[in-house]
Image (cartoon, grey):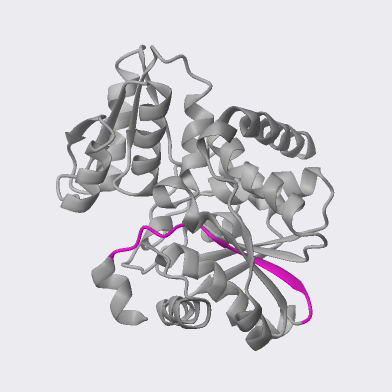
Amino acid sequence: MEDQICQSAAASVRARRRIADHIYMTPCLPAKLLGEVLGCDLHFKAENFQKTGSFKLRGALSKLTTLPTDQRVVTASSGNHGIASSFAASVLGHNLTVYLPEGVSPAKLDKIKSFGVDVVLKGSDSGQSEVIARAAAAADENLTYVSPYNDYEIMAGQGTIGLEIVEQVPEVDNVFISLGGGGLVSGIGSVFKAFGTNINVIGVSAKNSAALDAAIKNGSVVDVPHLDTLADGVAGAMDEDSLTLPIASAVIDELVVCDEAEIASALKLLARKEHQIVEGAAALALAGLVKNAEKYRGQTNIVLLCGANFDEQKILPLI
């Protein structure tokens, strides 16, 4: 596994060179007011300021820059990955088809269509759309399926965040990362471990949809309930053969699970103390720090704000 972690980190170094012209090097913002409240030196790695509004652009660009532009690509996502892949395809020149559930919100549909990609509305939810997209790729050897997380190049792109953190903030003790399918934490965690930074990686899951947390504790992917959650950007099941599980298991030092009240409280803290309005998946990472704040007092902590593509009707009433 040590070799795999080093290979993953090396892939992030290569990915950084490929995607640099198309992304922002997002800031690590000092959060002095909230840091004082929590008794620590706190910084926000602000991927909420990234182009397309989330970290997902890094992974999408990393993957597509490894494919020739005449390679037809298909993916499925009604959220950040779909938007990121559409942007990446538009700037790189790939022919992309995005499968979306039939009930996708008009706003998300319009956003994805704005990049000039092809859209297919099939499936009652994102999970079904993904199955259909995979089947389409399997039936056509000239069609490549791009997973939101279950791909080494996707992980490599997300790992570029770790490279930036190491450069931006010296002597980091802990980094709090929201857990979905594991691409984000696997990429960043591999960079930290391979470069010998001694940074603790704390993975934070939403109680209402904690697939990776359960898989790590079980040693394999298991079925868990998936209920509505404010952190909808990290909700959903994992692939049974997920490439991320062994890497995430090796690089995560601590696991934290937060409920909806804790996520809502973190959303409010971010808005009122730091004037940051983010999506629930971003607030989830802060909720993990707040839940165990006493444990991390006096330390240098980074909370990864993974995105800002929030549902106004869901988020704004809470803050």
Task: Using the rendered image of the protein, determine whether residue 292 is visible from the camera's viewpoint.
Answer: no
- Residue drawn where x is 70% and y is 45% of the image: 163
Task: Using the rendered image of the protein, determine whether residue 123 is visible from the camera's viewpoint.
Answer: yes
- Residue drawn where x is 64% and y is 29% of the image: 17
Residue 295: percent from the left, percent from the top?
73, 81
- Residue drawn where x is 42% and y is 32% of the image: 88
Residue 283: percent from the left, percent from the top?
48, 70
Position above or below: 156 against 279: above
* Magenta stretch: includes residue 133: no
Q: What is the total number of numbered labels drawn onto the structure image?
A: 0
Q: Is residue 37 left or right of residue 74?
A: right
* Magenta stretch: includes residue 306: yes
Q: Is residue 236 left or right of residue 101?
A: right
Residue 301: percent from the left, percent from the top?
70, 69
For the C terminus, the image quarter is bottom left
Residue interval drawn in magenta: 298-311
Q: Is residue 106 left or right of residue 166?
A: left
Residue 9: percent from the left, percent from the top?
71, 37
Question: Observer-nearest residue: 308 or 66?
Answer: 308
For the N terminus, the image quarter is top right
Position above or below: 216 against 183: below
- Residue drawn where x is 38% and y is 54% of the image: 236
Position above or below: 305 against 162: below
Position above or below: 208 against 166: below
Q: Is residue 196 left or right of residue 225?
A: right
